[in-house]
Amino acid sequence: MQPDTKTDVLKRLNFIDGHLAGIRRMVEADKYCGDVLKQTYAARRAIEKMEALMLNGHLRTCVVEGIREGRDDQVLGELSELYEMAGK
């Protein structure tokens, strides 16, 4: 992972950690379910943004490197697996 991407991912993970802790506090305090759900949706979007950032970096570095090294089948298999997992 490139240093800039890693820094951005770690920042987003800190944000997500804080968001999840806030959701836990809301549940423990018996907050209104609709309000809790709104926060879970926001946390999910934050995770999706982090995943997109990581995928973009992966495509631009690891995938390109793997193809240059002649590991086309391995790289394509991994991408196919990731694509399939993302769709579930």
Image (cartoon, rainbow, N blue to C red):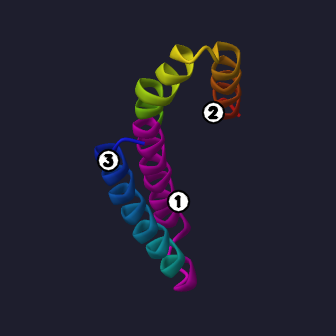
The magenta region covers: 27-54
Question: Residue at (39%, 38%) from the top-left corner?
Answer: 53
* In magenta stretch: residue 9: no
Looking at marks 2 and 3 on the same chain, the residue that comes earlier in the sequence is marked by 3
Residue 84, x across and y down, in percent: 70, 27
Q: Which residue is mark 3?
A: 3
What amino acid is at disc 2?
Ala
Q: State which quarter of the image contains the C terminus.
A: top right
Q: Residues within 10 Å of mark 2 (few under 14, many from 20)?
A: few
Q: Main secondary structure of the magenta part?
A: helix
Q: CA distance from mark 2 to mark 3?
A: 25 Å
Residue 81, x across and y down, in percent: 71, 28
Q: State which quarter of the image contains the N terminus.
A: top left
What amino acid is at disc 1?
Leu
Question: Residue at (43%, 28%) from the top-left corner?
Answer: 61
Q: Which residue is mark 1?
A: 37
Looking at marks 2 and 1 on the same chain, the residue that comes earlier in the sequence is marked by 1
Does 41 sit above or below residue 19? Answer: above
Please give the label number shown on residue 86.
2
Looking at marks 3 and 1 on the same chain, the residue that comes earlier in the sequence is marked by 3
Q: Comparing marks 3 and 1, which lies closer to the viewer?
A: 3
Q: Comparing marks 2 and 3, which lies closer to the viewer?
A: 3
